[in-house]
Image (tube, rainbow, N blue to C red):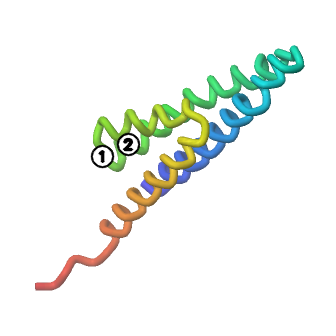
């Protein structure tokens, strides 16, 4: 489960940075300076990375048994600038708490 979390965290950051770059740099340059090349380059990169993000998120969700609704919301977080960072933090906190609960010794009766 820890490896799945590490993969998810890495992809969440990468997808978030690429999306922010696309929205805040490439798209404004496309319209302000009439230079669509950056969008034509970064757009497909984000698309491919987003698909990998979906797969990694699904893997983490199945291993940690995240509820379906939460899984879908986390997956959608990769489409809204800055939200993937917030979702990553929330998921990491939740999964780490589960990991700690799984590794803590059982109380003695």
Local crowd at mark 2 within 10 Å, few (<14), some, or many (≥20)? many
Vertical relation: 79 (above or below) 65: above
Which residue is pictured at 77% across the width and 20% down the height?
Answer: 39
Which residue is pictured at 72% across the width and 29% down the height?
Answer: 22
Q: Quadrant of residue 103?
A: bottom left
Q: Quadrant of residue 1?
A: bottom left
Image quadrant containing the C terminus:
bottom left
Write down the residue under mark 2: 61
Vertical relation: 52 (above or below) 70: above
Which residue is pictured at 45% across the width and 53% down the height?
Answer: 90
Front residue of 86 and 2: 86
Vertical relation: 75 (above or below) 94: above
Which element is circle 2 on? helix
Local crowd at mark 1 within 10 Å, few (<14), some, or many (≥20)? few
Front residue of 92 and 61: 92
Front residue of 24 and 90: 24
Q: Is residue 57 left or right of residue 82?
A: left
Write down the residue under mark 1: 65
Q: Is residue 44 left or right of residue 70?
A: right
* Label 1–label 2 contact, CB within 8 A: yes
Pinpoint residue 100: horizontal percent, then vertical percent: 37, 69
């Amino acid at each position: 489960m820890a490896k799945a979390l590490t993969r998810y965290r890495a992809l969440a950051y990468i997808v978030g940075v690429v999306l922010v770059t696309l929205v805040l740099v490439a798209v404004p340059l496309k319209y302000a300076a009439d230079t669509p090349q950056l969008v034509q380059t970064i757009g497909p990169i984000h698309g491919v990375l987003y698909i990998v993000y979906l797969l990694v998120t699904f893997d983490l969700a199945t291993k940690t048994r995240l509820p379906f609704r939460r899984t879908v919301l986390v997956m959608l977080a990769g489409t809204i600038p800055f939200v993937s960072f917030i979702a990553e933090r929330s998921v990491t906190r939740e999964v780490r708490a589960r990991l700690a609960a799984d590794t803590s010794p059982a109380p003695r009766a």
